[in-house]
Amino acid sequence: EAGVVQSPRYKIIEKKQPVAFWCNPISGHNTLYWYRQNLGQGPELLIRYENEEAVDDSQLPKDRFSAERLKGVDSTLKIQPAELGDSAVYLCASSLGDRGKNEQFFGPGTRLTVL
Amino acid sequence: GESVGLHLPTLSVQEGDNSIINCAYSNSASDYFIWYKQESGKGPQFIIDIRSNMDKRQGQRVTVLLNKTVKHLSLQIAATQPGDSAVYFCAENRWTSYGKLTFGQGTILTVHP
């Protein structure tokens, strides 16, 4: 079974440029998460989707970040414009969404470097 | 504030030894505590979880212990192998924010052959 797929794996951009990340979750997983992981830190949740609905986006910096999951499967996360402090690894995860299930399946992440 | 943190940032052990990774938490409202393993260049991988009303849970070569009195969580790895080398994160989850894992800082485990 294929895991969570993310692309690109690496991205280097200059500040003020836009950038987008793509995620394909595990087939059948209705819950999708985007996390940001700074160096040496644990992942921090940005947004959680149940099917196509964003049920928790309280940690998403909405002035520059946006996300969508139009058909309840793939998702994209966009930053526009990027700032130096956005350099991090952006992780996508998915799960079956059952209440109490703590097992989220993570993709390999996209390492973003903003120059 | 609410947080989940680790006592030791690094741990080095010899292959075959047992490893103990510790985690302190401050939020008594947590319903679950979870351990994840993250290898270099990969996303975190679920290891084991424990409900807050339990003291101990065992998996394959791993045991998680929960001491609610002192708000302490530990992960014990038996017969540690080089493939166990990774960063280990503890995390917490609550019914009211189901799915919003709060991760700690992480402990780097290095296993020497």
Image: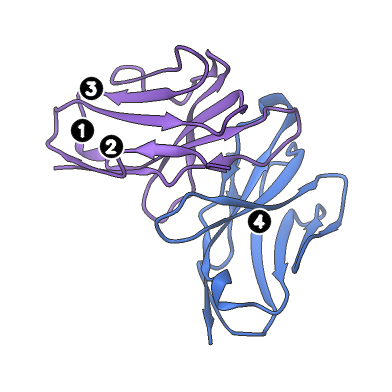
* Residue A86 circle label: 2
Q: Amino acid at mark 1?
A: Glu
Question: What secondary structure is marked by label 1?
Answer: loop
Horizontally, is B42 left or right of A49 in the view?
left
- Circles 1, 2 touching at the beta carbon (< 8 Å): yes
Vertical position of residue A102 compared to residue B46: above or below? above
The residues bearing labels 3 and 4 have C-alpha atoms spaced at a distance of 37 Å
Per the image, the residue denoted by label 1 is A83
Do the residues indicated by labels 3 and 1 lie within the same chain of the protein? Answer: yes
Q: Chain of mark 2?
A: A
Decide: few, some or many residues near mark 4? Use Cα within 10 Å; few <14, some 14-19, many ≥20: some
The chain letter of the blue chain reads B
Kindly identify the residue that appears in the image at 71 percent across and 25 percent down: B96
Q: Chain A colour? A: purple
- The circle drawn on residue A80 is 3
Disc 4 residue type? Answer: Ala
Reading the image, the residue beneath label 4 is B24
Q: Are marks 3 and 2 in contact (CB under 8 Å)?
A: no
- Between the residue at mark 3 and the residue at mark 1, the CA separation in whole angstroms equals 9 Å
Between disc 2 and disc 4, the foreground one is: 2
Residue B56, picture quadrant:
bottom right
Parent chain of label 4: B
Q: Secondary structure at mark 3?
A: loop
What is the x, y in percent for residue B14?
Answer: 59, 86
Give amino acid for label 3.
Gln
